[in-house]
Image (spheres, helix red, strand yellow):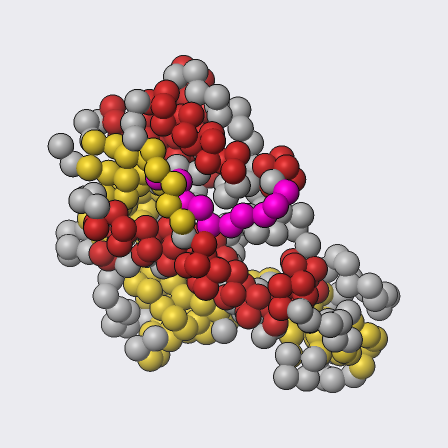
Amino acid sequence: MSKVIVGMSGGVDSSVAAYLLKKQGYDVVGVTMQIWQEEDQEFIEERGGCCGLTAVDDARRVAESLDIPHYVMNFRDEFKEHVIDYFVREYISGKTPNPCIACNRYVKWESLLQRVLAIGGEYIATGHYAKIMELPNGRYCVCRSTSLDKDQSYALYNLTQEQLKCTLMPCGTYDKEDIRMIAKELKLSIADKPDSQDICFVPDGDYASFIKSYANLNNSLGNFVSIDGTILGTHRGIIHYTVGQRKGLGIALGYPAFVIAIRPERNEVVLGNFEESHVQTLMARNINFMSVERLTKPTRFIAKIRYNHKGAWCTAVQTETDEIHCVFEEPQRAVTPGQAVVLYDGDYVVGGGTIQ
């Protein structure tokens, strides 16, 4: 009987994932990763947070109901280094990071997998809405979930071949409603628990305040400028803005204005109109390929440039070992440095990288 370690966040998806795997005959062990801890947990838990004490208690109760062992493992140091420090560093440099992608690669998989293998586990499993396939070429890749409205494949593009080979995602063939129904049939206490919506370590969504406090930053006022460099007004500091942003700019120009670039070296935020907020090309680095080892020729794919992007056709070219260029067939709005571009061949994730 194969031993699988299920990352149990205390939510409905990972709880049902543990049940489904036990039903399939695996030797299931539940593990809750303690990655972030505040003195006051109430607000985090109200927002569906996955890292607090109540989450640990919820996971433990589910494990008892399913009659599986449950452990808590401390990953605070790994989370601080690979997620929080990265998040703050990227924002200060004028980029907009995706901390969930970093957490998936370096904490939920890399760090957890090392411990799982050390204690005799063969697989790790999560409640993500995605599938893992082994292709005819012998490579593993993530595929879109059956439930496209809940699909989480975008945030998983950075997993390695070794990580994919040792991973199970049993929720990928279900709809969210089916998962909740299973939890209710099992009479699990978390059946109606809300999904986590915000970044777990910034539960109120005020990224700028968190970054200023964490990095001990003072306000650094600078200029709003147009594409040609004309000064338009004063901004509150670049950490308050992201490419594509329209609301909350605090400036009236007589037309809808969008952030189209951030220039940290000059402490400038570039504003433009709707048309100027669109671009047709992007360059990405820190590439991770899944379904192929590399791109050998210009190839047409569907590309997603953020989590909730519907995807758009582009032609991708690998220009360096760790660089790809994408040319879209239609201009795309808010192509944001720091976010990921993920390439799809049908439902398969080809790979992706960080937009530069």
Q: Based on the picture, tell me whether residue 140 belongs to the magenta stretch.
A: no
Q: Residue at x 41, y 66 (%)?
A: 353
The magenta region covers: 31-40
In the image, is 67 to the left or to the right of 214? Answer: left
Most foreground residue, 94 or 350? 94
Residue 349 in sight here: no
Q: Based on the picture, tell me whether residue 32 belongs to the magenta stretch.
A: yes
Determine the image quadrant of residue 7. Answer: top left
Quadrant where the N terminus lies? top left
Residue farthest toward the front in the current orientation of the protein: 39
Q: Is residue 346 above or below residue 190?
A: below
Q: How many marks?
A: 0
Percent across and percent down for residue 96 are 57, 64
Q: Residue at x 44, y 38 (%)?
A: 9
Percent across and percent down for residue 63 are 36, 27
Most foreground residue, 305 or 39? 39
In the image, is 206 to the left or to the right of 25? Answer: right
Main SS of the magenta segment? loop
Percent across and percent down for residue 41 are 60, 40
Percent across and percent down for residue 203 are 62, 47
Residue 100 in sight here: yes
Q: Residue at x 70, y 75 (%)?
A: 270
Most foreground residue, 264 or 34? 34
Q: Residue at x 67, y 63 (%)?
A: 213
